[in-house]
């Protein structure tokens, strides 16, 4: 009797284990879903680079999902509404929480539903003009804009975007007017300026721009960062050019749905910090003219995000750029 | 000038359609700012287009009604339209929920309803299995699409 | 330059690169044949697989997928009147008519040969003049684009087989459809009826599949029994292209290549018009004009040459300027960046092996595609001769999966049903969907260019006539339009069956 019971129990136990084991194994190695709310191509590239490293540091497989739409809103909404179990995360530009809530009256997602996890990279902005304009410094540009109000063309590839806000703040501070011409996307901005159909724009620092500067087909006036960029030591900062308040940058970060348990948050945050410290990742970022930033815990990142929000909300109030409906 | 219900001129119908679309577009676009030539607003284009479309629609209606010999519109059998549209709508609902194989089976069943000439029951189902298997292999296997084949896998 | 090209060839023909090129073009052809499934989806899916292979192999494969899809896209357009891409819509006009007359094999063969010739010549152009072409493209500002696109839309009236008023109405509807989506100046959704799926606009795929593929299926199934003749089985499956037919296709191919090469370098919108423009030019200047719309081989050769040439030259803005010309190029840009290569104006100097290797591999890819596709013609023709009751299932399956794959959402599939209903309606009322399609494709860039032009000039309309390039375009375009309208008045109008 006992023998039969034992063996039956053992068999049952084996069956139970056979059923449970794959489920348990699956749960711990279930791939993490990283939503990138942009179509493939830059800036999605930053996300894929990050995802690669992040997967290695975390020890889990990561599936990148491009969910483009509404300037990032569709993907953000998806993650904001997902279960806070650490399986769905968002890699997005900080503008989604840093400036969009102040610029746009109607958002597709609730920024409060997104919790900051870690900083992935920071990018810099450069005030750029076409050589035909004949200016080489910020003050020369300001003089030109004062002499001919409303004539200088600013091809606007993203209304309400960080470059747009940065430029608007610059113009507001200098007290000058410009002709805002809407075009579709950053590439159109570049094409317009190169072709002489645009005069000035704020570009994200990149190798492509650098090559144009080298060839003299575009002229960098100043960088919107606190210090000069290592790759462009000859270009002054906006601070040095008379606009100390314009130390701005953009960033990419990892976000999760609200309600993530603290332990999970901590674990994910540590992995992000490890990615930022990885020399290979840092080298890739440098080649992309980006920096890893210096944030190491979710708490620090949350403060970073708040500080960033303060900056942009002030700019939005000053410049009055608000997009309704 | 005969305008019986079953002999409506095709230009009249086209014109009515254009007019309705124009009204719909006008209604949808009127909340947006029209702007001026120097500062074109989001509403400029759609509103101008709906006016143009309305004018064209009215012109067609007038032409259709005033014709000496109306060219009556022939609607023809609606079964194929309903069957195929129904199949597509079924796919729209099923694909995100029920997996590739199930949805495609539903599509094929509904397509049959359009009145295709008969085929033996067994032969048809074998053909269906083959077609669905082939589709799954190509789309998911070769092209690597992110579509589950069955609801649970 | 020749030495650089030779270096490029030796790199392109290395085992790894050749293999990746082969894989790319095969996948691309498959993707192109399947309507709705576009190269964008496949390239994004395969992107991670290229990480380990190095930048050149990866880009070669992705490029192969892209222009391979152009080859394949005409297959279903010819066989079942279901264009896989915007560029195949025009091929379907005469191609499908040829198929209905039992000449599907010839149509497919002409398409393959024309595409190969165009691809070769275009690649040569890119090699010789790529950098200058890039700078030329920049001289096209918003006013020039606006004029070009307006001309394109007006010219589409020449393509339409319906009466003038209906065609104009179709244009308005197409333009309205293009207005759905994010407004360029505010980014907020317009005409979206509150649906988030429409916030970024209507996709091309559901519209094309519904208006063309499914509508054609409905048309065949609704026709009275026996009136849709099955093709005479005595016509050989793999007919030989007669010498005369080949010779007659040379001129259209060359004309198409020229048009496609030039239009392809224009970032954002050029390549879409390429096949339409080539077809229209062919109709005006080609021989045996009365055959157009009824199965004229030139009507297949010219647009196919144009869209393949455009596919090759659309790399120019990316390789010469670092500016992607369309969504697929943006993906390539991303792929290059991931591999640590950032294209810009100095790419040819900084990374000559990559630059010339890619160009050389484009030629290699075209050669592979010709060798692959010609023998396949027999297979396709055999498939197309299956009884329609079997084909229609294939059409339906491809439509549903294709539409779903765009955004992994059932919404796009439901849209296909809506456009199928519309397509059926147009069939019954004699409205030719081609004006709607072209206006829809060109509508968004047209509105953006017009708005940008007028904002630049502070509302001054003279901006369209005071710039050298725009004046040239206006004059050229005006002349072409006049000729088109006159020829339209002369040729007999045939009504839809």
Image (cartoon, rainbow, N blue to C red):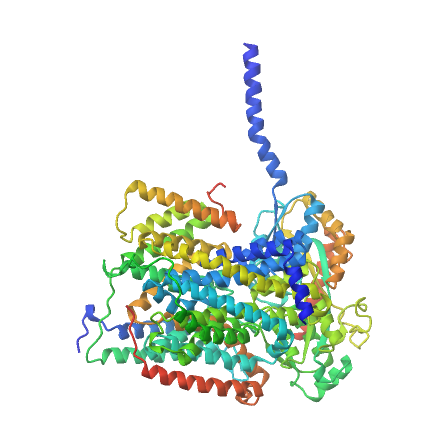
Corner quadrant of residue C157: bottom left
Quadrant assignment for the N terminus of chain B: bottom left
Q: In the image shown, does C181 or C224 lie closer to the viewer?
A: C224
Residue C7 rendering spot, x and y as whole percentages: 68, 64
Q: In the image shown, does A143 or C254 lie closer to the viewer?
A: C254
Q: Could one spot residue A311 in this view of the protein?
A: yes
Residue A122 rendering spot, x and y as whole percentages: 73, 61
Residue sitting farthest toward the front: C243
Q: Could one spot residue A324 in this view of the protein?
A: no
C448 left or right, relative to A134? left
Q: Is residue A238 above or below residue C36?
A: below
What count of labels does the image hold? Answer: 0
Q: Is residue A120 above or below residue C355?
A: above
Residue at the spot 76% in from the left edge and 79% down from the top edge: A138
Corner quadrant of residue C103: bottom left
Residue C477 rendering spot, x and y as whole percentages: 47, 84
B139 left or right, relative to C424? right
Residue sitting farthest toward the top: A1
Q: In the image shown, does A92 or A83 lie closer to the viewer?
A: A92
Q: In the image shown, does B94 or C486 lie closer to the viewer?
A: C486
Corner quadrant of residue C184: bottom right
B126 left or right, relative to C268? left
Residue C281 rendering spot, x and y as whole percentages: 44, 78
Residue at the spot 31% in from the left edge and 53% down from the top edge: C387
């Amino acid at each position: 009797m006992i023998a039969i019971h034992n063996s039956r129990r053992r068999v049952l136990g084996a069956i139970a284990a056979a059923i449970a084991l794959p489920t348990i194994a699956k749960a711990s190695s279930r791939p993490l879903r990283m939503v990138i709310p942009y179509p493939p191509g830059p800036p999605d590239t930053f996300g894929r680079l990050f995802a690669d490293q992040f997967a290695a540091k975390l020890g889990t497989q990561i599936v990148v999902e491009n969910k483009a739409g509404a300037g990032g809103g569709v993907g953000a909404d998806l993650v904001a509404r997902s279960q806070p179990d650490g399986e769905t995360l968002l890699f997005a530009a900080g503008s989604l929480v840093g400036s969009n809530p102040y610029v746009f009256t109607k958002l597709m997602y609730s920024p409060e539903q997104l919790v900051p996890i870690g900083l992935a990279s920071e990018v810099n902005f450069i005030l750029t003009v076409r050589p035909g304009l004949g200016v080489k410094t910020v003050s020369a540009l300001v003089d030109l804009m004062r002499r001919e109000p409303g004539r200088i063309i600013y091809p606007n590839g993203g209304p309400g975007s960080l470059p747009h806000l940065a430029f608007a703040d610059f113009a507001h501070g200098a007290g000058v007017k410009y002709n805002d011409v809407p075009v579709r996307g950053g590439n159109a901005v570049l094409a317009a300026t190169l072709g002489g159909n645009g005069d000035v724009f704020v570009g994200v620092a990149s190798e492509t721009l650098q090559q144009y500067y080298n060839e003299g087909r575009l002229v960098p006036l100043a960088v919107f960062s606190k210090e000069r960029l290592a790759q462009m030591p000859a270009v002054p900062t906006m601070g040095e050019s008379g606009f100390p308040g314009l130390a701005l940058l953009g960033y990419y970060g990892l976000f999760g749905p609200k309600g993530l348990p603290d332990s999970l948050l901590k674990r994910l945050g540590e992995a992000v910090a490890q990615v930022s410290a990885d020399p290979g990742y840092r080298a890739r970022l440098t080649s992309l003219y980006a920096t890893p930033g210096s944030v190491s815990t979710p708490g620090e990142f949350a403060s970073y995000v708040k500080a960033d929000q303060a900056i942009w909300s002030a700019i939005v109030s000053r410049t009055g750029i608000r997009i309704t409906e | 000038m005969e305008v019986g219900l079953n002999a409506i001129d095709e230009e009249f119908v086209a014109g009515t359609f254009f007019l309705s679309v124009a009204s719909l577009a006008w209604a949808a676009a009127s909340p947006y700012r029209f702007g001026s030539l120097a500062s074109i607003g989001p509403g400029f284009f759609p509103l101008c287009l709906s006016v143009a479309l309305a004018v064209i629609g009215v012109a067609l209606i007038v032409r259709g009604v005033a014709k000496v010999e109306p060219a009556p519109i022939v609607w023809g059998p609606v079964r194929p339209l309903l069957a195929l549209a129904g199949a597509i709508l079924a796919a729209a609902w099923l694909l995100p929920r029920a997996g590739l194989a199930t949805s495609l089976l539903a599509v094929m069943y509904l397509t049959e309803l359009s009145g295709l000439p008969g085929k033996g029951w067994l032969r048809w189902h074998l053909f269906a299995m083959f077609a669905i298997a082939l589709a799954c292999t190509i789309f998911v296997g070769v092209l690597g699409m992110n579509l589950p084949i069955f609801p649970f896998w | 330059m020749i030495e650089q090209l030779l270096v490029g060839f030796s790199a392109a023909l290395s085992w790894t690169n050749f293999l990746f090129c082969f894989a790319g073009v095969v996948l691309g052809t498959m993707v192109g044949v399947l309507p709705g499934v576009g190269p964008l989806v496949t390239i994004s899916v395969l992107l991670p697989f290229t990480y380990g292979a190095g930048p050149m192999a990866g880009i070669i494969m992705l490029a192969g997928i892209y222009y391979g899809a152009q080859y394949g896209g005409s297959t279903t357009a010819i066989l079942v009147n279901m264009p896989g891409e915007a560029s195949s819509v025009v091929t379907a006009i005469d191609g499908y008519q040829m198929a209905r007359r039992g000449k599907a094999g010839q149509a497919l063969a002409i398409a393959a040969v024309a595409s190969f010739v165009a691809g070769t010549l275009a690649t040569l152009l890119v090699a010789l003049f790529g950098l200058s072409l890039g700078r030329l493209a920049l001289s096209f500002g918003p006013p020039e684009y606006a004029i070009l696109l307006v001309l394109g839309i007006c010219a589409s009236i020449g393509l339409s087989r319906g009466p003038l008023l209906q065609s104009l109405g179709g244009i308005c509807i197409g333009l309205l459809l293009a207005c759905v989506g994010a407004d360029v100046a505010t980014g907020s959704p317009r005409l979206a009826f509150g649906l988030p799926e429409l916030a970024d606009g209507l996709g091309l795929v559901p519209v094309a599949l519904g208006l063309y593929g499914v509508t054609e299926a409905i048309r065949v199934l609704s026709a009275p029994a026996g009136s849709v003749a099955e093709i005479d089985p005595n016509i050989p499956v793999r007919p030989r292209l007669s010498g005369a037919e080949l010779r007659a296709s040379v001129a259209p191919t060359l004309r198409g290549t020229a048009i496609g090469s030039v239009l392809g370098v224009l970032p954002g919108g050029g390549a879409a018009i390429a096949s339409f423009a080539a077809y229209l030019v062919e109709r005006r200047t080609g021989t045996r004009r009365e055959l157009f719309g009824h199965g004229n081989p030139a009507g297949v050769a010219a647009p196919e040459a144009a869209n393949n040439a455009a596919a090759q030259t659309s790399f120019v803005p990316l390789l010469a300027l670092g500016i992607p010309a369309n969504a697929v190029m943006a993906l390539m840009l991303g792929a290059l960046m991931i591999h640590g290569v950032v294209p810009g104006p100095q790419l040819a100097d900084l990374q000559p092996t990559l630059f010339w290797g890619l160009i050389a591999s484009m030629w290699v890819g075209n050669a592979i595609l010709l060798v692959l596709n010609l023998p396949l013609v027999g297979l396709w023709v055999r498939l197309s001769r299956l009884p329609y009751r079997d084909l229609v299932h294939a059409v339906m399956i491809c439509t549903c999966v294709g539409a779903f794959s765009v955004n992994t959402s059932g919404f796009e599939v439901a849209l296909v049903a809506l456009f199928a209903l519309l397509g059926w309606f147009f069939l019954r009322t004699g409205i030719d969907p081609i004006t709607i399609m072209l206006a829809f494709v060109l509508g968004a860039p047209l509105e953006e260019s017009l708005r940008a032009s007028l904002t630049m000039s502070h509302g001054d309309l003279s901006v369209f006539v005071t710039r050298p390039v725009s004046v040239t375009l206006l004059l050229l375009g005006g002349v072409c339009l006049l000729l088109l309208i006159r020829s339209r008045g002369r040729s007999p109008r045939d009504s839809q069956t």
